[in-house]
Amino acid sequence: MALSGIQIYKLLPQTNCKECGFPTCLAFAMKLAAKQVELSDCPYVSEESKTQLAESAAPPIRLISLKSNGYEVKVGNEVVLFRHEKTFYNKPGVFIKFSDDIPAEEIKARVEKADSFVVNYVGIDLTIDGFAMECLSGDADKFAAAVKAVRAASKRPLILLSQDPAAIESGLQSLDGEAPMIYGANADNWEKMAELAKSHKAVLGVTTTFLEEATDLTEQIKGKGVEDIVLGLSSKNLSTNLIQQTQIRKLALKKNYKPLGYPTITFPTSAAEAAQAITKYAGFLVLDSFTEDFVYPLLVLRQNIYTDPQKPIQVQPGIYEINNPKPEDPVLVTTNFSITYFSVANEVEGSGMPAWLLVTDAEGMSVLTAWAAGKFDAERIAKAVKSFDVADKVSRKRIVLPGAVAVLSGELEAELPDWEIRVGPREAVDIPKFMKLVLA
Amino acid sequence: MDPTTGALGYGIEYGYSVMERLRLAALQGDSMTQLPMIVTPGFEAWKTKEAKVGEGVPAAWGDWLSRAINWEIMTAVSLLESGADILVLRHPESVKQVKAAINELMVVPERF
């Protein structure tokens, strides 16, 4: 954990020499604690203090990055237990696992399919992050060939799964210049695995059953000079996994406990396990198969949990076509707060009736909030009608206001004199009924 | 109490964080928040286009029925992880899997 200003002050020379530009060492320490100045501004700080301060400045959960030709997956560096305390920063990597006991051609075909998966959600392209290849054959050459097959079909980062250092070494041969993960190191093989990680600049995953064992292993591995470590706990159930993941995150953040200050890797086999992994702190998820119907909701969940709760998510203001509207169809107005937009768009779509949805720039606020803040008024709506050329798209000029801002109808009539102004329902859920009864 | 959450993809993160905050407040002694929480992931998830619509959607959305069930389970389990006490579900398969998840979560491991 970061040191307080007072703690930092104790490590400074305390001579108040002013050479750093501050009147006292304490003032400088406070600025350091707030990360507004650099320690190098103090010409007299001792080497010992420098080391201590550098350690305290290291992130409590190490940033780990897997790299391959043009791709990078970054995890770790998290600072909170609950997303409302600040935000979760680095989305867990979602990897698809294959094994070397299937023919190379089949591996290629399956990898290609998963590699090309892309689905658009709220204007964001969701894809998987990489692949894991597991050595089940027990044959190092076969494993190397399988890794090559994956590499031939995808350029995304890789995780090599085997506890046999010979297999891992053989698999790493075709991954020069990349930063893959090798998994995993256990109490028996860790020295050899650490050497391989070091010589190939790979990230090393440790695989243990209990937290204590993980602690011992990471300390030993760190002693060998390998610092890019990922924690794998082979949990048998959701309960143990939740406890382990929470303890790791808690000890790292609250106690600055370095032996567990690393991201984790999990191997979920069901929708429930995968959802737990996303919400409760996994750094990597390795799935044992690829199906769109599973990966799509999973990636959406990851997107949702890792959005910044401090900023409302917005959609692009504009005129959206729902159910292929024609010029005689009505124009519905709403704001560009994403949840507002999706609630309204979803209901209009569900009604089966065509409509134009005019999304105004309300700085990402919902209808009532935006109205109260003066970001959603008649003037702004009229401006949106003009800037998106709505009048050119419709033959019958009908515009529907959200019921919550019915009070705007008079002003809007003044702003848009040749339009027919209607007031819709207060709640999005009542839109289909409203459209059928009033607009049909 | 019903914290009224949205489905996966439709604002679940708001309800998720509200529930975590409610539970933390309850554990710190705020009597206003010390009520069990009821959530309706079945209703919410099956209202989404991803669950309701099987035709004219991108091929990358995958198999309709499995997608819909996964949508419901992932919505439900996320809310379970953030403190839900009663979950109202829809599909028998979701009920089965979410029940199994609850049973697993209630096991107290001897060692971890």
Image (spheres, coloured by chain):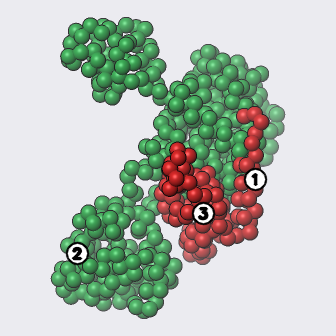
| Real-space Cα separation, disc 3 to disc 2, in angstroms | 39 Å
Mark 2, residue position: A378
Q: Quadrant of the C terminus of chain A?
A: bottom left
**Residue drawn 37% across and 7% down?**
A46
> In the rendered structure, the residue with mark 3 lies on which chain?
B
Q: Secondary structure at mark 1?
A: helix
Picture colour for chain A: green
Q: Is A10 placed left or right of B1 in the picture?
A: left
Q: A377 and A357: which one is in front?
A: A377
* Picture coordinates of residue A320, whole percent (x, y): 38, 73
> In the rendered structure, the residue with mark 2 lies on which chain?
A
Picture colour for chain B: red
Residue A180 is tagged as none
How dense is the environment of label 1, judged by Cα within 10 Å: few (below 14), some, or many (20 and up)?
Answer: few
Q: Along the polypeptide, which appears first: circle 3 or circle 1?
A: 3
Residue B71 visible within the image: no
> In the rendered structure, the residue with mark 1 lies on which chain?
B
Residue B38 is tagged as 3
Amino acid bearing label 1? Asn
Contact check, label 3 and label 2, Cβ < 8 Å:
no
| Real-space Cα separation, disc 3 to disc 1, in angstroms | 18 Å
**Residue drawn 70% across and 18% down?**
A191
Mark 1, residue position: B103
Q: Is residue B19 above or below residue A86?
A: below
